[in-house]
Amino acid sequence: MRRWIRVVALSITLLAAGTTPALARGPGLALDQDNVPGWSLMSSAERSAHHQKLLSMKTLDECTAYMEAYRAKMEERARERNRTFRTPRRDVCEQMKAKGLLE
């Protein structure tokens, strides 16, 4: 619960400062270090671009294709840095479809 309060406080602070928080929440889609495999392998700009790309998806097939390419890229980046790429706990595309964000 404390972590959630810190995230909300940080988001409010960043919004008040006129910046876009890296811990962005779209319509029913929150992305952060706890639920985005490869989060630590990306820059802040890459995280934001990844989030925006996901929000721009219209179909499940489009999302699935994007996520397959994203995972391959992050797996390669992890290998280059001698790090482990965490397997996603949930399928973000299926979650987006369940929330009505994808056809």
Image (cartoon, rainbow, N blue to C red):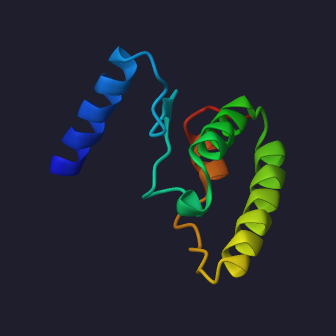
**Residue 18 occupies which quadrant of the picture?**
top left
Residue farthest left in this picture: 2
**Residue 21 occupies which quadrant of the picture?**
top left
Could you tell me residue 78's position as x and y percent? 67, 74
For the point 54% across and 56% down, the residue is 36
Could you tell me residue 24's position as x and y percent? 48, 34
| Left or right placement of residue 34 versus residue 4 in this view | right
Could you tell me residue 11's position as x and y percent? 34, 30
| Left or right placement of residue 78 versus residue 15 in this view | right
| Left or right placement of residue 93 versus residue 3 in this view | right
Q: Is residue 28 visible?
A: no
User: Would you place residue 80 above or below residue 47 in this image?
Assistant: below
**Residue 50 occupies which quadrant of the picture?**
top right
Return the residue nearer the eye: 23 or 65.
23
Return the residue nearer the eye: 102 or 33.
33
For the point 73% across and 78% down, the residue is 80
For the point 55% across and 36% down, the residue is 99
Q: How many numbered marks have been drawn onto this rendered protein structure?
A: 0
Return the residue nearer the eye: 74 or 29.
74
For the point 37% across and 17% down, the residue is 17
Could you tell me residue 51's position as x and y percent? 62, 39
| Left or right placement of residue 75 versus residue 20 in this view | right
Q: Is residue 87 visible?
A: yes
Give the quadrant of the C terminus: top right
